[in-house]
Image (spheres, rainbow, N blue to C red):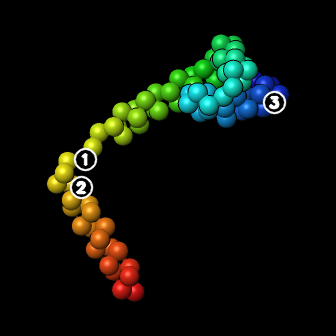
């Protein structure tokens, strides 16, 4: 991979997160999509980012059991009291 190509890929890799979140304008979306269509290594990194984002989103949609939430809140309050006493 040439230095120029690596720099080009680095630019696109920075935009992948925004691309995944639909935060790019149409022209940038088209440019990123075109690059992904032509660059296997970037496409693999895109697929990995998309998978990670999906797993995190799925994990974040679950809520902790109420007993665990209550224990965590008690512990947070204990830490807050200790900090305020210092």
Q: CA distance from mark 3 to mark 2?
A: 50 Å
Image-based side of 45 in relation to 29, left or right: left
Q: Which residue is mark 1?
A: 64
Please tell me which residue is depicted at 65% across the width and 13% down the height of the picture: 37
Single out the mark in the foreground, 3 or 1. 1
Q: Nearer the viewer, mark 3 or mark 2?
A: 2
Callout 2 touching callout 1 (CB < 8 Å) = yes
Mark seen at residue 83: none
Provide residue 74's location: percent of width, then percent of height: 24, 67
Kindly check if marks 3 and 2 are in contact, taking CB atoms under 8 A apart as contact.
no
Q: CA distance from mark 3 to mark 1?
A: 47 Å
Which residue position holds label 3?
3
Horizontal placement of 28 versus 65: left or right?
right
Q: Quadrant of residue 44?
A: top right
Q: Please report the residue visible at 36 percent of the width from the left and 33 percent of the height from the top.
A: 58
39 lies above or below 7: above
Which residue shows up at 50% across the image and 27% down it?
50
The percent position of residue 30, horizontal first and vertical second, equals 69, 17
Task: Give the class, few, some or many, for how many residues have Cα within 10 Å of label 2's Cα (few <14, many ≥20).
Answer: few
Q: Disc 2 marks which residue?
A: 69
């Amino acid at each position: 991979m040439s230095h120029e190509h690596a720099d080009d890929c680095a630019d696109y890799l920075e935009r992948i997160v925004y691309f995944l979140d639909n935060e790019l304008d149409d022209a940038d979306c088209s440019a990123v999509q075109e690059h992904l269509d032509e660059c296997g290594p970037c496409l693999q990194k895109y697929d990995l980012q998309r998978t990670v984002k999906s797993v995190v989103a799925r994990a974040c949609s679950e809520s902790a059991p109420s007993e665990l939430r209550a224990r965590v809140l008690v512990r947070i309050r204990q830490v807050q009291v200790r900090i305020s006493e210092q």
